[in-house]
Image (spheres, grey):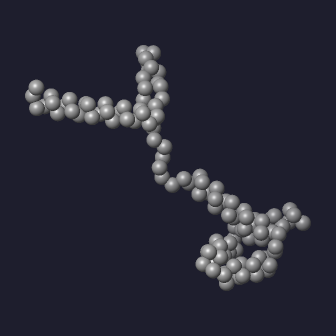
Amino acid sequence: MSATSTSSFALRSKRIVRNNRAIARGAELQLDQYGLLTVRPRRLQMRGLPFRGLLLIAMLVFGAKAMMLAQAGPTSYDARIERLAAGGALEQAGAWVLQKDRVSLAVGDYLRTLIN
């Protein structure tokens, strides 16, 4: 065998082994245009930031802040946040997250009108 055919064989062999390992992690069947079923490796899921999950968490935090503002009122809410800010490091982080902002104030006012 010549050196070029040996190297091309090694490349093809490596590609087949890689494909078989991918199929072992998960595969799906595809029907091609000729009616032949072929096994293809499953595509990997996106491994970036889960934007939907982060957006859901942010919406839940804003909703919780708005509910607390609607139930306690702005002055009582401020007093509770000041008590949190005077606590330990974790409580200070909670006070920073729960501080008032425009969105939670607006939603809290709207919820207060619905509650009362």
State how many labels appear.
0
Q: Is residue 50 above or below residue 62?
A: above
In the shown orientation, is residue 75 left or right of residue 88?
Answer: right
- Residue depicted at 77% across the width and 76% down the height: 77
- Residue depicted at 47% across the width and 24% down the height: 30
The quarter of the picture where residue 100 lies is: bottom right
In the shown orientation, is residue 96 left or right of residue 19?
Answer: right
Q: Is residue 102 visible?
A: yes
Residue 21 placement (x, y as % from top left): 37, 35
Task: Please identify the residue farthest to the top as the structure is shown.
Answer: 34
The quarter of the picture where residue 75 lies is: bottom right
- Residue depicted at 60% across the width and 78% down the height: 89
Query: Looking at this view, is 102 or 31 the one in front?
Result: 31
In the shown orientation, is residue 89 left or right of residue 36?
Answer: right
Query: Looking at this view, is 16 or 63 the one in front?
Result: 16
Q: Is residue 27 above or below residue 104?
A: above
